[in-house]
Image (spheres, rainbow, N blue to C red):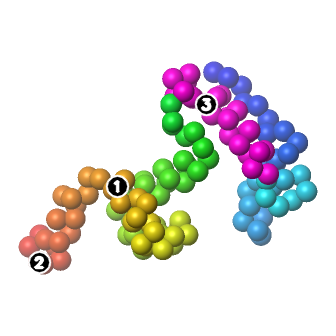
Amino acid sequence: MLAARPLGPCARAERPGPDGLLFRGVRGGHLAESTYCRTWRRARGDALTVEEVSSPLARRPYDLRHAAVSTWLNAGVPSTQVAEWAGHSVAVLLQIYAKCIAGQEDAARRRIAVALGQG
Protein backbone atom coordinates (compact mmCIF):
# COMPACT_ATOMS: atom_id res chain seq x y z
CA MET A 1 0.00 0.00 0.00
CA LEU A 2 1.29 3.44 -0.88
CA ALA A 3 1.72 6.06 1.81
CA ALA A 4 -0.52 9.08 1.50
CA ARG A 5 1.24 12.17 0.27
CA PRO A 6 0.52 15.54 1.87
CA LEU A 7 -1.60 18.01 -0.10
CA GLY A 8 1.27 20.48 -0.14
CA PRO A 9 1.36 24.19 0.64
CA CYS A 10 -1.45 25.11 -1.75
CA ALA A 11 -4.24 23.40 0.16
CA ARG A 12 -5.13 22.59 3.73
CA ALA A 13 -7.98 20.39 4.90
CA GLU A 14 -9.92 21.93 7.75
CA ARG A 15 -13.48 22.04 8.95
CA PRO A 16 -15.80 23.81 6.53
CA GLY A 17 -15.74 27.53 7.19
CA PRO A 18 -18.61 29.99 7.02
CA ASP A 19 -18.11 30.06 3.25
CA GLY A 20 -18.78 26.29 3.14
CA LEU A 21 -15.34 25.51 1.73
CA LEU A 22 -13.47 22.51 3.09
CA PHE A 23 -10.30 23.15 1.09
CA ARG A 24 -8.99 26.66 0.61
CA GLY A 25 -6.10 28.17 -1.23
CA VAL A 26 -3.19 29.56 0.78
CA ARG A 27 -4.74 33.03 0.62
CA GLY A 28 -8.24 31.75 1.36
CA GLY A 29 -11.04 31.30 -1.11
CA HIS A 30 -11.31 28.65 -3.77
CA LEU A 31 -8.42 26.50 -4.90
CA ALA A 32 -7.08 27.07 -8.37
CA GLU A 33 -8.34 24.42 -10.79
CA SER A 34 -4.77 23.41 -11.57
CA THR A 35 -4.16 22.72 -7.86
CA TYR A 36 -7.10 20.42 -7.28
CA CYS A 37 -6.68 18.67 -10.64
CA ARG A 38 -3.02 17.96 -9.88
CA THR A 39 -3.93 16.71 -6.39
CA TRP A 40 -6.79 14.63 -7.82
CA ARG A 41 -4.47 12.92 -10.32
CA ARG A 42 -1.99 12.11 -7.55
CA ALA A 43 -4.68 10.78 -5.21
CA ARG A 44 -6.24 8.74 -7.99
CA GLY A 45 -2.86 7.20 -8.81
CA ASP A 46 -2.29 6.37 -5.14
CA ALA A 47 -5.76 4.92 -4.51
CA LEU A 48 -6.51 2.94 -7.68
CA THR A 49 -4.92 -0.04 -9.37
CA VAL A 50 -3.02 0.43 -12.63
CA GLU A 51 -6.02 -0.96 -14.54
CA GLU A 52 -8.42 1.42 -12.77
CA VAL A 53 -6.17 4.42 -13.43
CA SER A 54 -6.22 3.59 -17.16
CA SER A 55 -10.04 3.40 -17.08
CA PRO A 56 -12.53 6.30 -16.89
CA LEU A 57 -13.23 5.49 -13.21
CA ALA A 58 -13.18 8.77 -11.24
CA ARG A 59 -11.16 10.43 -13.98
CA ARG A 60 -12.35 13.90 -12.94
CA PRO A 61 -13.41 15.27 -9.54
CA TYR A 62 -16.83 15.93 -11.13
CA ASP A 63 -17.27 12.17 -11.49
CA LEU A 64 -17.78 11.96 -7.71
CA ARG A 65 -20.69 14.39 -7.95
CA HIS A 66 -22.19 12.35 -10.78
CA ALA A 67 -21.79 9.15 -8.73
CA ALA A 68 -23.40 10.76 -5.67
CA VAL A 69 -26.41 12.09 -7.59
CA SER A 70 -26.88 8.75 -9.37
CA THR A 71 -26.66 6.90 -6.04
CA TRP A 72 -29.25 9.18 -4.42
CA LEU A 73 -31.67 8.67 -7.31
CA ASN A 74 -31.17 4.90 -7.34
CA ALA A 75 -31.71 4.81 -3.58
CA GLY A 76 -35.17 6.20 -4.20
CA VAL A 77 -34.60 9.73 -2.92
CA PRO A 78 -37.28 11.88 -4.57
CA SER A 79 -35.98 13.75 -7.61
CA THR A 80 -37.16 17.05 -6.12
CA GLN A 81 -34.89 16.52 -3.10
CA VAL A 82 -31.93 15.34 -5.22
CA ALA A 83 -32.36 18.36 -7.51
CA GLU A 84 -32.24 20.69 -4.51
CA TRP A 85 -29.13 19.01 -3.08
CA ALA A 86 -27.41 19.02 -6.48
CA GLY A 87 -28.38 22.60 -7.29
CA HIS A 88 -30.37 21.62 -10.38
CA SER A 89 -33.94 22.11 -11.47
CA VAL A 90 -35.86 18.83 -11.60
CA ALA A 91 -36.02 19.14 -15.41
CA VAL A 92 -32.25 19.47 -15.72
CA LEU A 93 -31.66 16.69 -13.18
CA LEU A 94 -33.84 14.24 -15.08
CA GLN A 95 -32.42 15.29 -18.45
CA ILE A 96 -28.92 14.48 -17.23
CA TYR A 97 -29.52 11.56 -14.86
CA ALA A 98 -32.68 9.73 -16.06
CA LYS A 99 -30.53 7.17 -17.88
CA CYS A 100 -28.76 6.36 -14.58
CA ILE A 101 -31.92 5.37 -12.72
CA ALA A 102 -32.29 1.59 -12.76
CA GLY A 103 -33.85 -1.24 -10.81
CA GLN A 104 -36.67 0.66 -9.13
CA GLU A 105 -39.64 -0.75 -10.99
CA ASP A 106 -40.61 -3.39 -8.38
CA ALA A 107 -40.37 -0.91 -5.51
CA ALA A 108 -42.46 1.62 -7.45
CA ARG A 109 -45.16 -0.98 -8.15
CA ARG A 110 -45.25 -1.91 -4.43
CA ARG A 111 -45.65 1.76 -3.45
CA ILE A 112 -48.50 2.15 -5.93
CA ALA A 113 -50.22 -0.97 -4.58
CA VAL A 114 -49.93 0.34 -1.03
CA ALA A 115 -51.29 3.73 -2.07
CA LEU A 116 -54.30 2.00 -3.67
CA GLY A 117 -54.87 -0.09 -0.54
CA GLN A 118 -53.84 -3.30 -2.26
CA GLY A 119 -50.63 -3.92 -0.40
- Does the magenta segment cover residue 38? yes
Q: Marks 3 and 2: in contact by CB < 8 Å?
A: no
Mark 3 residue type = Ala
Going from N to C along the chain, the mark reached first, 1 or 3, is 3
**What are the residue bounds of the magenta stretch?**
32-54
Q: Secondary structure at mark 2?
A: loop
Give the number of the mark in front: 1 or 3. Answer: 1
Name, please, the residue furthest toward the left. 118
Instruction: Give the residue at x 85% y 45%.
Output: 10
Q: Marks 2 and 1: in contact by CB < 8 Å?
A: no
The x, y position of residue 15, in whole percent, is 75, 57
Mark 2 residue type = Gly
Residue picked out by circle 2: 117
Mark 1 residue type = Lys
Question: Marks 1 and 3, how far apart in space?
Answer: 28 Å
* Residue 31 versus residue 35 in the image, above or below: below
Q: Which numbered marker is on residue 47? A: 3
Instruction: Give the residue at x 86% y 59%.
Output: 28
Q: Secondary structure at mark 3?
A: helix
Residue picked out by circle 1: 99
Examine the image and state in which quarter residue 2 appears: top right
